[in-house]
Image (spheres, coloured by chain):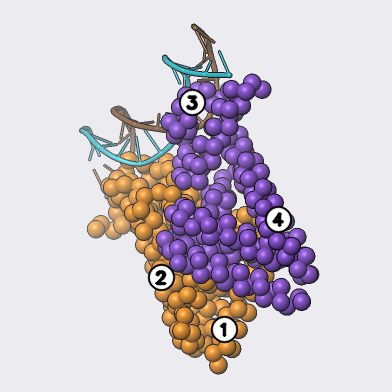
Chain colours: A orange, B purple, C cyan, D brown
Amino acid sequence: MGTKGENNRTRIIEAADQLFYKHGYNQTSFSDIADITGIPRGNFYYYFKTKDDILAAVVETRVKQYREALVTCDNASDNPGKRLHAFLDIMAGSEDSVVDTGCPIGSLCVELAKDTEALQTKSREVFVLLRDWMSRQFEEIGLVDANDKAMDLLSRMQGTALMACTFKDSAYLHRSVGDLKNWINNLVLSES
Amino acid sequence: MGTKGENNRTRIIEAADQLFYKHGYNQTSFSDIADITGIPRGNFYYYFKTKDDILAAVVETRVKQYREALVTCDNASDNPGKRLHAFLDIMAGSEDSVVDTGCPIGSLCVELAKDTEALQTKSREVFVLLRDWMSRQFEEIGLVDANDKAMDLLSRMQGTALMACTFKDSAYLHRSVGDLKNWINNLVLSES
DNA sequence: GTCTATATGTAGATAGAC
DNA sequence: GTCTATCTACATATAGAC
């Protein structure tokens, strides 16, 4: 638990996080991470037993980051509809990287769906966090099928990111986010 | 252009098609294809100059197959709404593989979004075919924003496949396909 | 056209000096 | 805790006999 060691560990996770997003998990090598961090390949095994362990650490970091982002959304408004809008704005705000590389969560799950079950379960964790938070917002709106609506919103956001990235179309991304905000508004109206 | 040679070429493409879907492009090796076909690794270079060339051939095969599937949808009904339903039934009909491995088109595009631009352009071709066909259906329905609606339908189908696969949830897949059919029906009604 | 043998590079992982 | 050197496996790709 030395201070220097934890610092190196964090730097490995941060570099891996970016590389897994930009190039994918399987296409990221220890050498790539070594080049960015300046930490030699062989040293990684002092901090992580396997490459899968690095992935687990990356996912846990992402869960923490999204948890914080959701707290910001929670504080954005008393209105659950507006809180969901705030979450949509996160995606719209990272327009450039979404069009270039897709959604970091979705693309990881798609890649690892073709890998071991252990990696699938791990990569799914961020989605579980988001789905449950969305479900709570729809519940507060008064919808009886809040969990279904959470799946629908997550699904449509993922479809939006996938198409925007595939067609390199930021205009579609913004139109679609606007449509989703209207969809949420209509759900709020139907319950009031 | 010998008969035997064309046969081997076709068998390589078919095996690669399945493996690219089940394990991904980057995770499929020449040895994997050799194991399935019984054709030795070294022989592949008689038919294809590089691995990327195999991918191109696989995508072209898929374009042909989907083109035929769209002809079947065209023949299914005089009603463009019903033709779109017929296309949705293709996805619902391959429920097991979609939940297990995701959408073959979408997952390839997601993977190759992190690769060279040449592979991105190639993998996108199937989506272009489907988008243009859907756009023609929405046009016939009478919608002025037919191309936008085509993007929306493709987007929502991709989101549906991604979430159904990530959460291993075939019930969600079917509910979502049903919702999309209702969405199409409402668009038809709004124009009649 | 078909096959074996091999070249060349790089992957994840380990051993052991300091 | 940190680093170099190295092991083993396997990737794409090539050369050349048959």
Measured Cα–Cα span from mark 2 to mark 1: 22 Å
Quarter of the figure with residue B9: top right
Measured Cα–Cα span from mark 2 to mark 4: 44 Å
| Nearer mark to the viewer, of 2 and 1 | 1
Circle on res. B75: 4
User: To which chain does the residue with label 2 belong?
Assistant: A
Which residue is disc 1 drawn over? A187
User: To which chain does the residue with label 1 belong?
Assistant: A
| Mark 1 surroundings within 10 Å by alpha-carbon count, few (fewer than 14), some (14 through 19), many (20 or more) | some
Measured Cα–Cα span from mark 2 to mark 3: 46 Å
Q: Residue at x 48, y 71 (%)?
A: A151
| Nearer mark to the viewer, of 1 and 4 | 4
Judged from the image, the secondary structure of the residue bearing numbered disc 2 is: helix
Which residue is disc 3 drawn over? B39
Q: Residue at x 66, y 22 (%)?
A: B1
> Do the residues under discs 1 and 3 have CB atoms within 8 angstroms?
no
Q: Amino acid at mark 4?
A: Asn
> Do the residues under discs 2 and 3 have CB atoms within 8 angstroms?
no
Quadrant of the rendering where the N terminus of chain A is positioned = bottom left
Q: Amino acid at mark 2?
A: Leu
Q: Is residue B91 visible?
A: yes
Which residue is disc 2 drawn over? A129
> Is A187 placed above or below B70 here?
below
Same chain for mark 4 and mark 3? The answer is: yes
Measured Cα–Cα span from mark 1 to mark 3: 57 Å
Whole-percent x, y for residue B68 in the image = 67, 47
| Nearer mark to the viewer, of 2 and 4 | 4
Quarter of the figure with residue A179: bottom right
User: To which chain does the residue with label 3 belong?
Assistant: B
Judged from the image, the secondary structure of the residue bearing numbered disc 4 is: helix
Q: Amino acid at mark 3?
A: Ile
Q: Which callout, 2 or 1, points at the residue further toward the start of the chain?
A: 2
